[in-house]
Every structure is written in C-alpha cells, then in structure tokens.
Amino acid sequence: MIATLDELINEAEGLAVDLTDEIINDDGNAAAARGSILGSYVARTAKMLADAKYHQDMAQHNALSLIYTENPKISPSIAKELSQSKCAVENRVVTLIERLNRAATHQYSFCVTIISKAKAEMQLQPRM
C-alpha cells in the first residue's frame, strides 16, 4: 500500500525529531540498542522514499500533461522545468526522506563502529 503525501510528511517529521534529538554515546550496549532502532529507520525510510517518488512521478506526469495540453509547442526543457516547479511539495518530501535515510544510515554506521570498539576493548581486558 502506498502512503499518502500527508502520511509521509507526518512520519518524516517524527523521524526527523528522533534522528536529530537522540545522542549516541560511547557505550557499546547503548549503541547496539540504538543501532537496532536505526536499522528499522533505514528500512522504513527506504519504503517511504519509494512511496514519495511515486507521488513525485505522478505529479510530474500530471503537470507535464497539463503543460503540453495548454501549450503543445513548448520546448521539452522548459516543460520539464515548469513541471518540476509545479511539484514543489512532492520534491520537498522526496528530499526530506532522502536526507532522513542518509542520516539514519550514517548513525547506524557510527553505532557499528562503537560496537566494534567496545568488542576490541573487551578482548584487551585481562581475563580472570
């Protein structure tokens, strides 16, 4: 099922708050817990991005159809620019979700680094 633009915007705004407010500390256990959450964010934002791009493509198609109906002799490059400007909301949602996906991916990678560091430190600890 494809999410509506409003659903995507609401969910993206909630994810944006969590991705910017949560601080990842140096503790391996906390990083593992946060990494679990971030892994689901990466997957979720990938689905959201696909839905947002669907809406973007449909809006651009509709805009191009309208532009060519109103002015069939318009150049393709001008028509493309006009159609993109008519899809400002869809373009914004795609950009926002792309950024959230990247942020979640980078934070996930950072958690993996912290976990690796914690494992290496545990191996250096003398065994009793």
Image: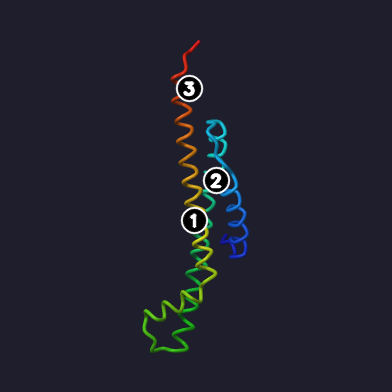
Q: Residue at x 50, y 62 (%)?
A: 94
Q: To which residue does mark 1 refer?
A: 99
Query: Distance between the Cα atoms at labels 1 and 3?
Result: 35 Å
Local secondary structure at mark 2: helix
Q: Quadrant of the N terminus?
A: bottom right
Q: Nearer the viewer, residue 2 or 12?
A: 12
Q: Residue at x 39, y 81 (%)?
A: 78
Report if the CB atoms under discs 1 and 2 are less than 8 Å apart.
no
Left or right: 48 with respect to 120?
Answer: right
In this rendering, the answer to whether 30 lies above or below 127 is: below
Local secondary structure at mark 1: helix
What's the residue type where badge 2 is placed? Ser
Q: To which residue does mark 3 refer?
A: 122
Q: To which residue does mark 2 refer?
A: 40
Percent position of residue 77, x then y: 37, 79
What's the residue type where badge 1 is placed? Arg
What's the residue type where badge 3 is placed? Met
Residue density around tag 3, few if under 14, some if 14–19, many if 20 or more, within 10 Å = few
Percent position of residue 57, x then y: 47, 69
Query: Distance between the Cα atoms at labels 1 and 2?
Result: 16 Å
Q: Residue at x 46, y 26 (%)?
A: 119
In this rendering, the answer to whether 81 lies above or below 20 is: below
In this rendering, the count of numbered labels is 3
In this rendering, the answer to whether 77 lies above or below 25 is: below
Q: Earlier in the sequence, mark 1 or mark 2?
A: 2
Query: Distance between the Cα atoms at labels 2 and 3?
Result: 27 Å
